[in-house]
Amino acid sequence: MTSISYINWYSMNDRAIAQHIGKFIKHHRMEQNKTQEKLASAAGISRSTLSLLERGETVTLATLIQVLRVLDQLHTMDVFTVHQTISPLLLAEAEKHKRTRARSKNKIKPY
């Protein structure tokens, strides 16, 4: 598996995407020389559930996260990071109201 992907995700149906995820899991399990039984036990799931995941069958999101954690592949979740952006208009408006001078809040008045 390479870090560069040329897959057209939009042309794939849900089943094909699930199978692709299953291949990813199986690939990393095999690379780490772990049996299904060993990985499933470490993830707190049954071996049959792991087998379903690797075949692209329906499993819960929690199961996928547990398996990714044990395989040390949680970094794949980085693609779900939301980056806050501010529109140029809002940025210009904020700059317009930015303070340019400092002033003391408590002015001492001479008597």
Image (spheres, rainbow, N blue to C red):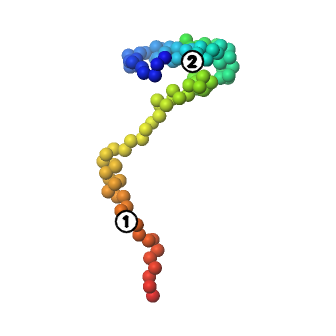
Residue 53 at x, y percent in the picture: 57, 16
Residue 78 bears which disc, if any?
none
Residue in the picture at 42% in, 21% down: 4
Q: Tell me: residue 56, above or below residue 102.
A: above
Q: Tell me: residue 66, above or below residue 48.
A: below
Residue in the picture at 42% in, 20% down: 5
Residue in the picture at 65% in, 13% down: 35
- Residue 34 lies left or right of residue 61; in this view the side is right
Residue 101 bears which disc, if any?
1
Q: Which amino acid lies under the numbered mark 1 shown in the image of this protein? A: Arg
**Quadrant of the rendered structure where residue 8 is?**
top left
Q: Tell me: residue 44, above or below residue 84.
A: above
**C-alpha gap between disc 2 and disc 1:** 57 Å
Q: Nearer the viewer, residue 31 or 68?
A: 31
Q: Nearer the viewer, residue 14 or 50?
A: 50
Q: Nearer the viewer, residue 36 or 10?
A: 36
From where the camera sits, is residue 82 visible? yes
Tag 1's secondary structure? loop
Tag 2's secondary structure? helix
**Quadrant of the rendered structure where residue 88 is?**
top left
Residue located farthest toward the bottom when viewing the structure as drawn: 111
**Quadrant of the rendered structure where residue 63 is?**
top right
Residue 75 at x, y percent in the picture: 53, 29
Of the numbered discs 2 and 1, the one sitting upstream in the chain is 2
Residue 74 at x, y percent in the picture: 55, 28
Q: Residues within 10 Å of mark 1 (few under 14, many from 20)?
A: few
Residue 28 bears which disc, if any?
2
